[in-house]
Amino acid sequence: MISFENTAISFKGKSTKDLRRAYWLFKIIGNNAVVKIGKWVTNTALMLNLPINGIIKKTIFKQFCGGETIKECDRTINQLAEYGIGTILDYSVEGKTSQKDIDSTVKEIIATIEHAKGNASIPFAVFKITGIARYEILVLSNEGLGKLNNAELQEYEGMKNRVDQICKAAFEADVPVFIDAEETWIQDSIDHIVTEMMEKYNKEKAIIFNSIQMYRVGRLTFLKNRIQIAKSSNYFLGTKLIRGAYMEKERRRAEEFGYPSPIQPTKGDTDRDFNTALELIIDNIEHMSLCAGTHNEYSSTYLTELMAKKGLEKDDKRVYFGQLLGMSDHISYNLAFNHYKVAKYVPYGPVKEVLPYLLRRADENTSARGQSSRELSLITKERNRRRNKK
Ligand SMILES: Cc1cc2nc3c(=O)[nH]c(=O)nc-3n(C[C@H](O)[C@H](O)[C@H](O)COP(=O)(O)OP(=O)(O)OC[C@H]3O[C@@H](n4cnc5c(N)ncnc54)[C@H](O)[C@@H]3O)c2cc1C
């Protein structure tokens, strides 16, 4: 059975200085009150145009991001590759609405695909549809295209053309691409577009991957249907399986508008559906490719067991494990050490622009969610091991 206990393997790629920085960072963001104050100070400093880029770049940015440009990420790409871990370049600029900004985001995503072309260290590309469309058009089209007026329909077609442009570039470069899952009130629209892209580009193998959030009620049925459709329409179903990142926002909105929460009642329900979905996918792997995007030790272990039971090689290219840069290295490094296929999202972009992403990571790692205490105890274990070796 795979073990994630070996911190010498987990932190092989980290210098003692890196570990010290990570220790203090997780210590700080593990404290709810400090995160709240930190967010307030950051937002105020940004509003007042105070020069805080330097301090952010040396601390939280260094932990969770690869750089400000693709070129700056090369160092991280090479470091990860040295330990058998792939990079997924994630241009993490959010909330752009002008046509000029949207066009430049499309160009940047295509540049990540070009950088990945023929490069075994970058096995996937990724993007969010909200990065290349006006949010409102996704909300409107989620209700069905029948309700759109002519101008809106035209805007919708423009969005679909941009998605197609990226997917075509991925197909021609032979670089599989993930399309991230987002909020439920735009996800039907995303699912619809991504399914069309899969029908078009996944005839020989999975190039386009949809993302399925198992914290949603009913996503197992959704997955089963998608497998059936892919089988009968003769294309490969690319699936990035995740639990889901917008739980609080989803519950808040459901309460505000008075509809039943789309989120599972308990964490146990989410876990059960996530693990059952893994079974379903491995059972149907002849028609699919999977990336299990998770920091959950049990689910990662369970997937290795399902692969063994099905008789798959550990390095079967159809099954990837995915984590985020700066988090759960114990899972990534131990899996890669044991010859499984692993890739990490490496977010990048100008410091100021990736700040929303960084604040989400800080939130996710506060003591309330418990992630930072696990990271801290692993880092402490490794620091002690290195001290005792001297
Ligand atoms: C490579 C990668 C790609 C990702 N891509 C996306 C994406 O496209 N879209 C997206 O939304 N997220 C994405 N995520 C984030 C992901 O959805 C999770 O938020 C994050 O990974 C934490 O879940 P976990 O599987 O690591 O495990 P855990 O830490 O075991 O689980 C935490 C998750 O369980 C769920 N949960 C927690 N409490 C409850 C509760 N009370 N009731 C019901 N469910 C609960 C939530 O989804 C929470 O995030 C990605 C993560 C990775 C590593």
Image (cartoon, grey):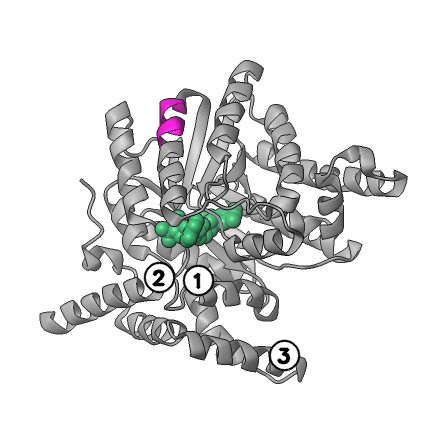
Residue for point 20% across, 66% down:
382
Residue at image mark 2:
371
The CA span between labels 1 and 2 is 7 Å
Which badge, 1 or 2, comes first in the chain's sequence?
1
Q: Is residue 29 above or below residue 346?
A: below
Q: Is mark 1 within 8 Å of ligand 1?
A: yes
- The boundaries of the magenta stretch are 279-285
Which label sits on residue 262?
none
| Residue 9 x/y as whole percent | 22, 55
User: Tag 3, which secondary structure?
Assistant: helix
Q: Amino acid at mark 3?
A: Leu
Which badge, 3 or 1, comes first in the chain's sequence?
3
Q: Is mark 2 within 8 Å of ligand 1?
A: yes
Looking at the image, the residue that sits furthest to the right is 150
Residue at image mark 1:
364
| Residue 165 x/y as whole percent | 69, 38
Residue for point 56% across, 25% down:
202
Residue at image mark 3:
46
Is 173 colored magenta in this rendering?
no
Contact check, label 3 and label 1, Cβ < 8 Å: no
User: Tag 2, which secondary structure?
Assistant: helix
**129 vs 350, nearest the viewer:** 129
Q: Amino acid at mark 2?
A: Gln
Q: Amino acid at mark 1?
A: Glu
Contact check, label 1 and label 2, Cβ < 8 Å: yes
Q: Image quarter for residue 208?
A: top right
The CA span between labels 3 and 1 is 22 Å
**106 vs 380, nearest the viewer:** 380
